[in-house]
Image (spheres, coloured by chain):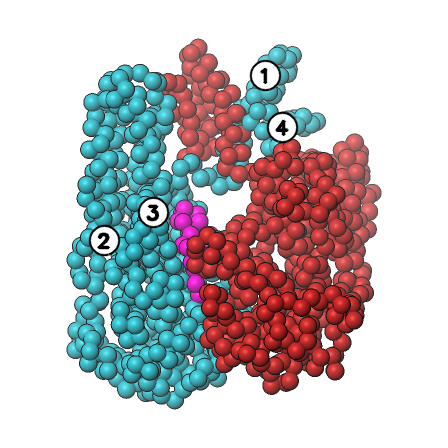
Chain colours: A cyan, B red
Amino acid sequence: MSTLHLYDSLTGALRRFEALNAPHVGMYVCGPTVYSDVHLGNTRTFLSFDLLFRYLKHLGYKVRYVRNITDAGHLENDADAGEDKIAKKARLEQLEPMEIVQRYTLGFHAVMQAYNALPPSIEPTATGHIVEQMELIKTLLADGYAYEANGSVYFSIETYLKTHPYGELSGRSIDDLETGTRELEGQTDKRHPLDFALWKKALPEHIMRWPSPWSVGFPGWHLECSAMSTKYLGSEFDIHGGGMDLKFPHHECELAQNKGATGHGGARYWLHANMLTLNGKRMAKSTGNTLDPRDLLAGTSEHLSKAYSPGAVRFFMHQAHYRSVLDFSDSALQAAEKGYHRLLASMQTLRKRPAHGPEQGTWNFGEWDAACTEAMNQDLNSPILIAQLFEATKAIAADQIDPQVLGTSGAKELLGRMEVWMFEVLGLAPEHQANNQQWQKALDSAMSVVLDLRQKARETKNWPASDALRDTLVEGGIVVLDGPEGSSYRLE
Amino acid sequence: MSTLHLYDSLTGALRRFEALNAPHVGMYVCGPTVYSDVHLGNTRTFLSFDLLFRYLKHLGYKVRYVRNITDAGHLENDADAGEDKIAKKARLEQLEPMEIVQRYTLGFHAVMQAYNALPPSIEPTATGHIVEQMELIKTLLADGYAYEANGSVYFSIETYLKTHPYGELSGRSIDDLETGTRELEGQTDKRHPLDFALWKKALPEHIMRWPSPWSVGFPGWHLECSAMSTKYLGSEFDIHGGGMDLKFPHHECELAQNKGATGHGGARYWLHANMLTLNGKRMAKSTGNTLDPRDLLAGTSEHLSKAYSPGAVRFFMHQAHYRSVLDFSDSALQAAEKGYHRLLASMQTLRKRPAHGPEQGTWNFGEWDAACTEAMNQDLNSPILIAQLFEATKAIAADQIDPQVLGTSGAKELLGRMEVWMFEVLGLAPEHQANNQQWQKALDSAMSVVLDLRQKARETKNWPASDALRDTLVEGGIVVLDGPEGSSYRLE
């Protein structure tokens, strides 16, 4: 059987995955900057790495999965200029920055939970690691990779270039990078335009600030991930993940910081999840061509004809490979939903299959299961895995006509493995995850029929029928209340 | 109308509540040490302060509610000795301490959410405020209230006593405190047995550690609350809350730290929630006389005959005053549940009341509503508020016989206010919060009747009846699937 291979952005190659310290795996994924609601692109990225987390666990690895929360240091402009994103939002809403952090961290957790993403093992924050970041700066200063200027500290690309390449992760040459860099206001302390901040002296209006040996200020955005990945996973660990947009400058700077401070780049495999579009165009709030992960579940968007279940949306996402651009559209979601329901219905058929036919069927279950594993081993090729699941539905349909196809044990085995692939690995919901409102609506409609029937039984004084109905409902935890205005019900 | 009065533990008196900077209120509540599942006593404490948070909001205050997460520095022994609780659990489970923190923080949030507690505005962590705690130590050293000894820093009670009383919050005299203090191993650095640690030098085996001007070590447990309440609420703020067991030493030390560093004690009102018992006896894991907040909702305890809804449990808790000891027992929970359901049913009656009778009824609605407010204004006397809600059910019952009692507008007004008191202030669930399993069970039982009926209609070729059934179900979001084994259904 094949083994897991992952596409590593640093080498630009599909590489066989070898854990540094098996069965342990250390994985770091760049989490959200919590200054606004998590958007759908980020949601897809986190679900892609949830798929990886799940698959690694499925393979038997013990994964320490660290996903940070950026709650300070992320300025509006990636080139170390502008206001802190969280502080700006706090100023606009007249709140303390940490109130902004709390609101959007809780919102982010709610979305992740709704989409059935497993929580990471550790969820460290930038503000929670100011000491560690200052220690890292001290190391980089001592190693000569950083310099202080007017209370700020910068990473020196020129010094770094003497012994290391820069731009290797994003595949950019220094010349290209220099051409692309605009000189921005307030950056005059930098010796070179590609230098980036490790510590910034706080301007008087900057409210998120900490004392340091250099100034009262705040850490540079790239620093937290180096500090926290090293603290929780070591200077060399297995996997670093994030959205494609983080390759440059964020991950490039992180890599340079790591090498400068420890000699190691950090992760041995750098993974990047691709972006998404809506109706073929880039999503942007300014043009209204945007969709929210909550909109999808609530159906509250002009781009949607209806609400979709979290399982259907996840199914849709995993029908594309995580490194492909994924286009959202109502019709594509509807098609995915249909396919997802077809798979669920097919599994339901299997659950209700009577024990008939031989023990083992003619269908090659082992080959099918190996193909599922093979798909996931090839850089998490979930679209092929899903295609394999549809192959299984054909066998299930054939078995309905001729029980020789699966056989009794074969059918059970297949069901068990389909559950593993669908629920454990792909993270789809094992049961219908309706919300309270949907349940209430469904139960109200069913109960309108039942209470009608009960009313008729009582009118015709058919007490046995009326009592039987009541007994059935009591078993379901439903209490019928008779009042002057007719009967109603409530759950126990 | 009366105004809010709160019982202040520091003065031992019921005091009129005056916000320092109305309409803003700053409230700090000591949160959990996240080294194990939150226990029922803590749950009650947090729900008591959720009630206060809700009532303050109801009164129109803009509350900044800070509740911390203790993720470092809380040693097994309150007298600064023993292992860090989180590090110990991490050692036993062979995990990184922050993995322990993540697991139990998520578990704590899940319990709070299940019981419908509003999230606080800010949820700061001890490890997230190492810098702020070191700054506070520097201030206390500079002010002469602290001294360094072998890399650790202690708060000096003798120095503090020269200008301040100590023991005022817990009502203990220095003589009593000194008598009660045992000299413990490893405390020989202390000048006085009542001195407490602000910073502890880490022993080689202590894994949670940070560099500081005094040693590589960790902050004392009491320090975080002083540092974080000052950072987010200022040196003087409105309310500090916590469980009764935190009065001494935790809050006493916090108060001393605050006064030493800023001249202010911190909060102007110190509130303490009382403990609970189970079947008349102290809860203790060692004797098995224990109950978990999750057990109550799942019914999984030898002390319970059944599961209770979060609303019923909260109702039970708020039927006791927050400063009274509350005894949990299955029979008391059953009685509370019955009362809670009676209130909900009475509100349902009001919702279905036909528009008849006069506009305004004879019942004195204004007097009743004022009595509800009066109850809550008297130190959050929720038992009296609940008694008033039961008074309203009597009026509702009388109105069913004679619509002169409430009148059409009067009935609507009453329903609106009952909803405010029940759901907004007491935090009970506005709708039945069944879990997926309960819904599924209920819907299965109702649908068994409906599918039977549909089957009969089809057998007798009564197509209009069969179609009508299908239409009703479609409206409820239910899809009927016909297969060779009979019909089944699923939600859309």
> Looking at the image, is mark 4 or mark 1 earlier in the sequence?
1
Magenta-tinted stretch = A108-125
Q: Nearer the viewer, residue A448 or B70?
A: B70
* First reached walking from the N terminus: tag 3 or tag 4: 3
x then y, percent, for residue B299: 60, 36
* Mark sitting earlier along the chain (2/4): 2
Label 3 amino acid? Lys
Compute the Cα span from label 2 to label 1.
61 Å
Callout 2, which amino acid? Phe
The subunit letter for the residue under badge 2 reads: A
Residue for badge 2: A17
Label 4: state its secondary structure: strand
**Quarter-of-image position of residue A150:** bottom left
Residue B60 in magenta? Answer: no
Along the line of sight, the residue nearer the viewer: B6 or A366: A366
Distance in Å between CA atoms under marks 4 and 1: 13 Å
Q: Check chain identity for marks 1 and 3: say if they share one.
A: yes
Disc assigned to residue A126: none
Residue on which disc 1 sits = A468
Q: Give the residue type that dot 4 points to.
A: Val
Label for residue A57?
3
Lateral position of residue B47 relative to residue A355, left or right: right
Q: Looking at this view, is A57 or B147 the one in front? A: B147
